[in-house]
Amino acid sequence: MKMTKIAALIAAAAIATPVVAQDLHFPMLNYRTGPFAPGGIPFADGYQDYLTLINERDGGIGGLPIRTTECETAYNTERGVECYESIRGDSPLIVQPLSTGITYQLIPRVTEDGVPLHTMGYGRTSAMEGETFPWVFNYPANYWDGASVAINYLLDQNGDSLEGKKIVLIYHNSAYGREPIPTLENLSERYGFELVEIPVDSPGQEQSSQWLQIRRERPDYVIMWGWGVMNAVAIQEAANIRFPMDHFIGIWWSGSENDVVPVGEGADGYTALTFHGVGTDYPVYDDIQEYVVDRGLAAGNGDQIGSAVYSRGLYAAMLAVEAARTAQDLAGHAQITPAEMRAGMEALSISEERLAELGLPNFSAPFDVSCQNHGGSGAAMIQQWDADAQTWSLITDWIDSDRELIGELATADAAAYAAENNITPGCM
Amino acid sequence: MSENVLFALEAAANGLTVGIMYSLVALGFVLIFKASGIFNFAQGVLALFAALTLVGFQTGQVPFAHLINAIFGTNIHDFGFTMPAALAILLTVLVMILIAILVERLVLKHLVNQEPIILFMATIGLAYFLEGLGDIMWGAEVKRLDVGIPQGMSPWVDEVTYNLFGYGFYLDELSLWALGIAAVLVTALVVFSQYTKQGRALRAVADDHQAALSVGISLRFIWVLTWSIAGIVALVAGIMWGSKSGVQFSLSLIALKALPVLILGGFTSIPGAIVGGLLIGVGEKLFDFLMQPVIGGATENWFAYMLALVFLLFRPQGLFGERIIERV
């Protein structure tokens, strides 16, 4: 009887005192399967490896371990939303869906639930307007920045004039692919170049019509907004029609090893934008080797380390960890809530000194996030593929985007969104 | 000749070669449907699996390496040697035959006399299984496939058309090779079905299952034979498409291009698959060329299905399909 009473008391105490998780939950909405897995796997591996490094080397953030949960979206919007629904009650500190389609579906949900959403280099561009999208962040660069940086690079290559030039935009015929069109149209008027828009339906396995048209148009440059198999096919077709590869510029999602390796020698000289460094020549990779790989903790096959999209995943994880540190400093305690994480993201400051301390010197352009600007610096570099060495190398320094123009476009788009959704913009 | 006419001719010529690539995929569907009445949803995945296996053999990749490493804590990825393309193709053919035997033993044998929709559902399951198996066996990363087929602009076509019209046409050498390979493949299939004992047995089963069984033809053997041939055709399609875009999991989606080809050509006709492919190829390229200035391009995906829809309205059995006779 006595034992029964003790057991009942223990049970009652367990119910009355909920166990508080002493960890920081970083969910991962990955895609390791399906047609877009070649892009999803390296990003997921880079993201996970960096978080493992922080746990193994530093014991977590502020003394609390990072807990990761993985949900497979297969780059499918419905499955992505289901993944979010499955983790939203588990205090997710930051959600990164790596899909513009999923992002659009999640924006109203995270706003209602109070969960920070980070869409690094993808998603809704006007989410950089923090007063309208307080829970959404797209630093350090967005698609409109990408379009502007590409044009600024071409201006630099052509003595600051694109007058009379013809530029083709070949794009994935989706919300993602159509994102840069307003910016490019605007820049076309400003700088006097002719813009020819050529869509490619998903997945883009067959593009001979598009490249016949490009051959007929005889453009000076081709800019590509592709993803998945579309990239490799486009680069192969460009090589087939003998289009000069150094006049072919991809957005950062068209600049991975997956896009150029299948083309072989033909891809030599192809260029793409990037908003982070390339290769493994950064001290952080020594730590990843020591604390992650050598301990048998590498994510996936462990064969993606140093690839372009792996570096991007690592960068996304680094920014999430830095935001969590900032949030802990602001809150004055380690066990932060999603709302406190949001405040940390809004106060995030990435300086050259901090990048060097993290073992990533000059890996990113420095930037500060604020209530008004959730979009970071907008700067990017140009990387070029060397088919013999099988490596990307940087051929420019940081190129700034035209933030004045992009700000105008983003403000107009955000204002329309606010009006549609009865949002009164303002800082939280 | 005006510039626009030349451009249209060039688009049509490209349509012909692309159409042949579609036909290569459609052929596998026709073979299985003709012999067993099964619409094989897994045909696209068979092409993907064959291409993955071929690259795996060529590069000396260890199958299931990720799984082995995860279980035993090892760090193996490849055998350390590469294989000549011809040997790798031969070994892949053997793998495709093995798959045909397993499909018959583990799936079809247990579904004899079931409704076509049941068999169709079984092939959907097979597609998912093979896709997962390919992922675990060979990994999901993009792979380069090179069996020595040249790619790029054909200088011969460029020169001839330039001399004729003053404008050099662009045709991809890979597509020209596809034309030749398709011709050899169709000839081989016709010779096999007309002049060999197994081929005649296959035709007998296609005509009437019951009658074929009554004269001692083994239905199980014929199914293995049909799936083996479809597997080899899938390998050919996988090589051609994989050379074009690299071997990646979206390769299985090429099956979607075969459906309108089948509707046009008929589900039971090998020449129909070829003609259907050519019609779809030329039709979609010309339509895109003509309508691009008006509606902005990217019409190819839906144009093929629209054309198929028109055919379904007026000739549901396709151009070469068996006439549908319903007796009341």
Image (tube, coloured by chain):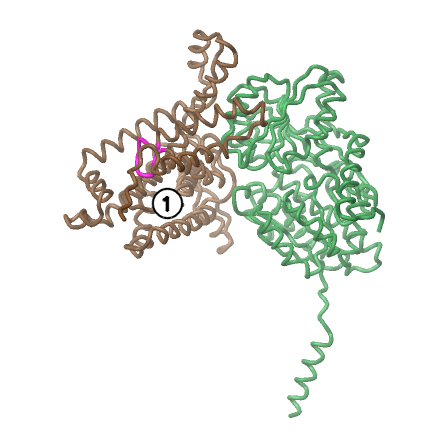
Chain colours: A green, B brown
| Residue B174 as seen in the image, left or right of residue B116 | right
- Residue A414 seen anywhere in this rendered image of the structure: yes
Residue A71 lies in what quarter of the image? bottom right
Q: Is residue A90 magenta?
A: no
| Residue A189 as seen in the image, left or right of residue B178 | right
Q: Residue at x 73, y 42 (%)?
A: A138
Q: Report x, y in % for residue B122.
A: 38, 52
Taking A341 as reference, is A158 above or below it?
Answer: above
Taking A10 as reference, is B176 above or below it?
Answer: above
Q: Nearer the viewer, residue A187 or A41?
A: A187
| Residue B197 as seen in the image, left or right of residue A263 | left
- Residue B91 seen anywhere in this rendered image of the structure: no
Residue A357 lies in what quarter of the image? top right
Q: Nearer the viewer, residue A262 or A403?
A: A403
The disc numbered 1 marks a residue on which chain?
Answer: B
**Which residue in the structure is indicated by mark 1?**
B40
Residue span colored magenta? B265-273
| Residue B42 as seen in the image, left or right of residue A394 | left
Q: Report x, y in % for residue A266.
A: 53, 24
Label 1 secondary element:
loop
Q: Residue at x 76, y 30 (%)?
A: A401
